[in-house]
Image (spheres, rainbow, N blue to C red):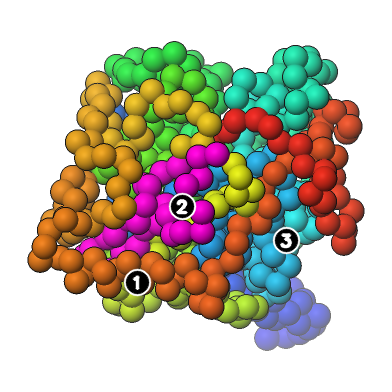
């Protein structure tokens, strides 16, 4: 080649070489640092997805589950906050003081302990950009308890356990959920029930979006988070995204797009505020959101290097009443639902997909014992990110990616010791003060339930929560055994629906005693059990003091005082 006559000058050649080196380096970095999306679904029942026989239209979820790996024995806690704490810390919630049967109440002070490092902090220390969209509900009394104080670079969503899908508010005193009696009868600037706003873009409450449908807003923020990765100057940091969907938590409200209700006209059931047709429309809209996540990952060219881990925070809330917080989910054929320690309450809808999932895992099903505490070490292992603290969870990535056996035969599902939930011991209805109760443990294939399978606190259920709700027609079948029994024993291999209590069977008495001893072991402070953090709303948390905004109310380093406790209401979850 004649350098003088060639169109390729030496400088151009060097430029091409530099560009090739850059592209190769980028490709290596891309291969070494996959993107991770943790998709947490809210209150979706076992039979609220098509691949479990539901009449709800969920084609995107069904397809992702079918082409990925279904985790059919992924266990969680019976309620929201305990599960989310377990996911974030990799520790059982009864070892962080976040095992409240009421979940974390608005205005209360519980949160992730300072010494426990979160998923976001783990990935951030490993060089990841960390973003969160959706529901937090693991503490907000101080800014350090919020997502921005727990390792996330950005946060777009709400801090409490629920908000209205349009007004983005939560009542501070309405019906049997009155957290501040001084607000009784007050109509705030956001509405009746002394409604207060809870929707944030990092440190800013986006009150200008009052009245706008939240799920559409999540989709828009998702595009905003993912789109930079589809540009020529894509971020150098790989992405960890925690997408905590709002649906299908109460309130039961139809999406604005009419096609979702139209797709659910044949789905019936429920009464009063509990309308299964409307809940179905919410599932339909959730499915569109999940499908859009895949679509955007493909659009911006990062699907092939992304892993999606989907998990529900608990079973679906069933129609045990006609008012809030009852809902119209079905966990058929499993027994019970959210708030119970039966399979319908603690068995999660869960699957893994994404282009980074090995081909050998695609189209498979795992029935190994997994738990929410496994998510942190598993995702860290997949991404090659070192753990910051040692928790209770197992690294089950080999089980997911290759089908390797999980070294687990025993799994505590809930360990309750009265008084529960950090409430004072004089609160009526909390019997057997100091005794193990509302507890369950699996020692495969056996499952023991110690004490009440769910806690009733100052509410009147129209029917028991530990029955069965069918899919078609949404028919309720009541259990024949008493609700309050000292022990229950089930063989899950033979009786997945927990219809045959074998606790009185003479041939199983030695086994029952052994399992009870294991529950007592977990319930011992010597083995890590801690009392629930105080879960009583504080007077200074009253949103009327903050322009009707639910926001942090304690300064860093400041602790709440017993004299500041306000709560006189009646709430179940």
Q: Looking at the image, which residue sits at the far left?
A: 507
Check disc 3 and report the residue beneath it: 150
Q: Which quadrant of the view contains residue 335?
A: top left
Q: Is residue 568 left or right of residue 311?
A: right
Q: Of discs 3 and 1, which sits in the foreground? A: 1
Q: Of discs 2 and 1, which sits in the foreground? A: 2
Q: Which quadrant of the view contains residue 123?
A: bottom right
Q: Judging from the image, what secondary structure is the residue with disc 2 in?
A: loop
Residue 299 picture location, percent across and down: 55, 48
- Are dots 3 and 1 in contact, CB under 8 Å? no
Question: Disc 2 to disc 1, how far (Cα)?
Answer: 18 Å
Question: Which sits in the foreground, 389 or 102?
Answer: 102
Question: Disc 3 to disc 1, how far (Cα)?
Answer: 36 Å
Residue 570 falls inside the magenta stretch: no
- Locate the N terminus and report the quarter of the image it occupies: bottom right
Q: Magenta segment, which residues?
A: 428-455
Label disc, if present, on residue 432 of the rendered structure: 2
Q: Which residue occupies 45% across, 70% down?
A: 522
- Locate the C terminus and report the quarter of the image it occupies: top right
Q: Earlier in the sequence, mark 3 or mark 1?
A: 3
Question: Which sits in the foreground, 116 or 239?
Answer: 116
Check disc 1 and report the residue beneath it: 517
Q: How many marks?
A: 3
Residue 442 falls inside the magenta stretch: yes
Q: Judging from the image, what secondary structure is the residue with disc 3 in?
A: loop
């Amino acid at each position: 080649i004649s350098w003088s006559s060639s169109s390729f000058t030496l400088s151009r050649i060097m430029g091409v070489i530099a560009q090739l080196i850059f592209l190769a380096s980028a490709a290596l970095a891309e291969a070494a640092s996959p993107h991770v999306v943790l998709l947490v679904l809210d209150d979706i029942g076992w039979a609220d997805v098509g691949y479990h026989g539901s009449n709800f239209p969920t084609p995107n979820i069904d397809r992702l589950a079918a082409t990925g790996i279904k985790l059919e024995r992924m266990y969680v806690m019976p309620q929201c906050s305990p599960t989310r704490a377990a996911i974030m810390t990799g520790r059982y919630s009864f070892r962080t003081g976040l095992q409240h049967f009421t979940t974390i109440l608005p205005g209360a002070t519980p949160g992730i302990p300072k010494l426990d490092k979160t998923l976001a902090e783990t990935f951030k220390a490993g060089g990841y950009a960390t973003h969160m969209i959706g529901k937090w509900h693991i503490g907000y009394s101080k800014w350090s308890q919020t997502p921005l104080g727990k390792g996330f670079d950005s946060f777009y969503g709400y801090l409490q356990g629920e908000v209205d899908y349009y007004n983005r508010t939560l009542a501070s005193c309405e019906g049997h959920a009155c957290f501040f009696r001084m607000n009784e009868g007050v109509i705030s600037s956001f509405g009746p029930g002394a409604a207060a706003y809870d929707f944030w873009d990092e440190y800013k409450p986006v009150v200008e979006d009052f009245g706008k449908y939240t799920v559409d807003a999540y989709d828009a923020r998702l595009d905003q988070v993912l789109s930079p990765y589809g540009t020529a100057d894509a971020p150098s940091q790989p992405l960890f995204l925690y997408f905590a969907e709002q649906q299908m938590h109460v309130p039961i409200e139809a999406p604005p797009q009419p096609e979702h209700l139209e797709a659910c006209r044949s789905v019936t059931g429920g009464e009063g505020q509990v309308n299964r047709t409307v809940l179905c429309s919410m599932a339909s809209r959730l499915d569109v959101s999940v499908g859009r996540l895949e679509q955007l990952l493909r659009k911006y060219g990062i699907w092939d290097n992304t892993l999606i881990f989907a998990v529900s925070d608990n079973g679906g809330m069933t129609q045990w009443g006609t008012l809030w917080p009852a809902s119209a989910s079905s966990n058929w054929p499993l027994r019970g639902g959210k708030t119970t320690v039966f399979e319908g309450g603690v068995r999660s809808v869960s699957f893994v997909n994404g282009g980074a999932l090995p081909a050998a895992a695609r189209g498979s099903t795992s029935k190994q014992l997994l738990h929410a505490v496994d998510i942190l070490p598993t995702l860290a292992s997949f991404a090659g990110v070192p753990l910051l603290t040692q928790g209770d969870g197992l690294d089950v990535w080999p089980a997911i990616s290759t089908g390797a056996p999980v070294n687990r035969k025993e799994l505590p599902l809930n360990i309750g010791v009265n008084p529960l939930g950090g409430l004072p011991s004089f609160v009526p209805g909390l019997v057997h003060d100091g005794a193990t109760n509302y507890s369950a443990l699996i020692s495969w294939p056996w499952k023991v339930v110690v004490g009440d399978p769910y806690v009733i606190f100052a509410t009147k259920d129209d029917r028991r929560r530990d029955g069965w709700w069918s899919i078609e027609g949404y028919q309720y079948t009541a259990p024949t055994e008493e609700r309050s029994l000292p022990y229950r024993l089930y063989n899950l291999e033979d009786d997945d629906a927990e219809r045959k209590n074998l606790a009185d069977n003479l041939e199983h008495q030695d086994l029952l005693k052994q399992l009870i001893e294991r529950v007592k072991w977990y319930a011992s402070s010597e083995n890590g059990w801690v009392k629930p953090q105080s879960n009583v709303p504080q007077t200074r948390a009253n949103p009327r003091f903050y322009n009707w905004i639910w926001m942090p109310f304690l300064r860093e380093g400041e602790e709440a005082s017993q004299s500041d406790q306000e709560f006189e209401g009646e709430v179940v979850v």
